C-alpha cells in the first residue's frame, strides 16, 4: 500500500477538512429559537476551549464545523415577532389538525434549528408546515400519505 494512504501529508491537518453543514438561505426564528442558537454557540465556545487544552484534533474539527454553522445561523437569523393572528396559519402559530385516521396532533410552527416534531414543533420549511401555511380552520391539507383538517389555530 502506498504511504499516501497510510500517512498524513506533512503540514496538513485532515481533521480541519470536515464538510460544512448546509445552511439554508432563509432563517426565520422565534425568540426561543434565537436563544437556542445563542446557547449552542456559548456551549460550543466552551467545548472549543476544552478540546484545545486537551489538543483533541478530532473533537476540535467537529466543534469548528458546528461553530461555523451556528455562527452563520446567528448572523442570518430573522427574528419573527410572536403573532396574535389566528385567521390563517402563520409562522409561530400552534395548529391542531385531525388526520383522516382520526388522530389529532398539535404543532407549533418554528424555525429549522428549533424544530422537533416529537416535542410538537415543526420547521416552517417542512412539508406539513408548508401545507398548513396560509390556510384556515376547517381547511383540508395534505399530511403525509393522507389528508388532515385544521381544527384550531392559536
Image: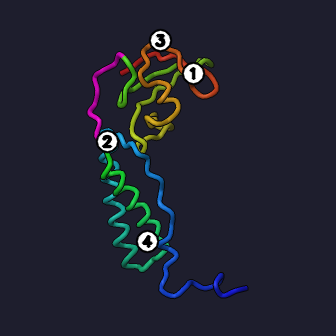
Which residue is more in the foreground, 142 or 23? Answer: 23
Residue 103 numbered tag? 1
Q: Which residues lie in the magenta part?
A: 78-87
In percent of width and height, residue 93 lies at 37, 27
Within 10 Å of the Cα at label 2, are there few (<14), some (14-19), or many (20+) other Cα atoms?
A: few
How many numbered marks have been drawn onto this rendered protein structure?
4
Residue 138 numbered tag? 3
Above/below status of 11 relative to 22? below
Spatial CA distance of label 3 from label 1 is 16 Å
Dot 1 and dot 4 residues touching (CB under 8 Å): no
Residue tagged 2: 32
Spatial CA distance of label 3 from label 2 is 29 Å
In percent of width and height, residue 82 lies at 28, 31
Q: Nearer the viewer, mark 2 or mark 1?
A: 2
Q: Nearer the viewer, mark 1 or mark 4?
A: 4
Spatial CA distance of label 1 from label 4 is 45 Å
Residue tagged 4: 60
Within 10 Å of the Cα at label 1, are there few (<14), some (14-19), or many (20+) other Cα atoms?
A: few
Q: If you read the primary sequence from the N terminus, does the residue marked by circle 4 or circle 2 appear first?
A: 2
Which residue is more in the foreground, 25 or 16? Answer: 25
Helix, strand or loop under label 4: helix
The residue located at (38%, 62%) in the rendering is 67
The residue located at (64%, 84%) in the rendering is 4
Amino acid at each position: 500500500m502506498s504511504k499516501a494512504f497510510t500517512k498524513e501529508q506533512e503540514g496538513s491537518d485532515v481533521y480541519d477538512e470536515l464538510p460544512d453543514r448546509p445552511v439554508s438561505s432563509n432563517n426565520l426564528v422565534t425568540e426561543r429559537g434565537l436563544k437556542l442558537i445563542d446557547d449552542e454557540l456559548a456551549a460550543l465556545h466552551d467545548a472549543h476551549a476544552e478540546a484545545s487544552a486537551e489538543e483533541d484534533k478530532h473533537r476540535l474539527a467537529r466543534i469548528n464545523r458546528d461553530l461555523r454553522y451556528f455562527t452563520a445561523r446567528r448572523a442570518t437569523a430573522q427574528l419573527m415577532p410572536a403573532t396574535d393572528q389566528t385567521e390563517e396559519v402563520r409562522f409561530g402559530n400552534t395548529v391542531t389538525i385531525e388526520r383522516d385516521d382520526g388522530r389529532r396532533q398539535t404543532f407549533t410552527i418554528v424555525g429549522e434549528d428549533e424544530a422537533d416534531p416529537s416535542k410538537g414543533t415543526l420547521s416552517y420549511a417542512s412539508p406539513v408546515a408548508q401545507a398548513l401555511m396560509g390556510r384556515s380552520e376547517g381547511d383540508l391539507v395534505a399530511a403525509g400519505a393522507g389528508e388532515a383538517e385544521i381544527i384550531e389555530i392559536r
